[in-house]
């Protein structure tokens, strides 16, 4: 049997030279935020070369597109901020079965 790891998402992605570090997070069973919701806590780190990361992103994009085409995920339009940077166009995060996804934003890629 192979080890398996469940993650609730990506907490942060850090690029340092030719290495990409992807921090996986999980919802804490004990820690809560100010609203009483479970906090995301560090779970494990994936470390890639730039090529390995790029290949993984390409594969995940293909899987994501397959989920959109199958109807498991839907895309929605994001409300535009009052002032947006020139040339920026960001799509709303996809929803899962009509429910909004939580944001997994990294300060490195805002």
Image (cartoon, rainbow, N blue to C red):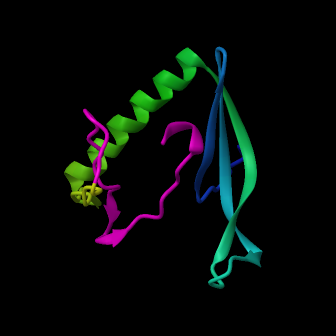
Q: Nearer the viewer, residue 59 or 21?
A: 21
Q: Nearer the viewer, residue 2 or 62?
A: 62
User: In the rendered image of this protein, does residue 90 appear above or below residue 21?
Assistant: below
Q: Residue 52 placed where, x, y %?
A: 56, 20
Q: Nearer the viewer, residue 99 or 105?
A: 105
The residue sitting at 66% across, 85% down in the picture is 36
User: In the rendered image of this protein, does residue 23 appear above or below residue 34?
Assistant: above
Q: Residue furthest bottom?
A: 36
Dominant secondary structure of the magenta stretch? loop
Residue 28's image quarter? bottom right
103 displayed left or right of 79: right
The residue sitting at 54% across, 25% down in the picture is 53
Which residues fall within the magenta stretch? Answer: 83-110
Residue 34's image quarter? bottom right
The residue sitting at 28% across, 44% down in the picture is 66
Q: Residue 20 placed where, x, y %?
A: 63, 26
The residue sitting at 40% across, 28% down in the picture is 58
Q: Residue 7 placed where, x, y %?
A: 63, 55
Q: Residue furthest front?
A: 83
User: In the rendered image of this protein, does residue 14 appear above or below residue 104?
Assistant: above
10 displayed left or right of 39: left
Q: Is residue 100 magenta?
A: yes
53 displayed left or right of 98: right
């Amino acid at each position: 049997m192979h080890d398996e790891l469940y993650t609730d998402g990506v907490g942060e992605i850090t690029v340092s030279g030719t290495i990409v570090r992807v921090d996986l997070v999980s919802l804490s069973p004990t820690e809560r935020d100010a609203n009483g919701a479970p906090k995301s806590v560090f779970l494990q780190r994936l470390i890639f070369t730039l090529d390995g990361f790029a290949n993984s992103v390409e594969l995940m994009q293909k899987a994501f597109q397959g989920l959109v085409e199958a109807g498991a995920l839907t895309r929605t339009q994001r409300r535009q901020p009052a002032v947006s940077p020139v040339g920026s166009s960001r799509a709303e995060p996809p929803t899962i079965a009509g429910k909004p996804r939580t944001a997994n934003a990294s300060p490195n890629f805002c």
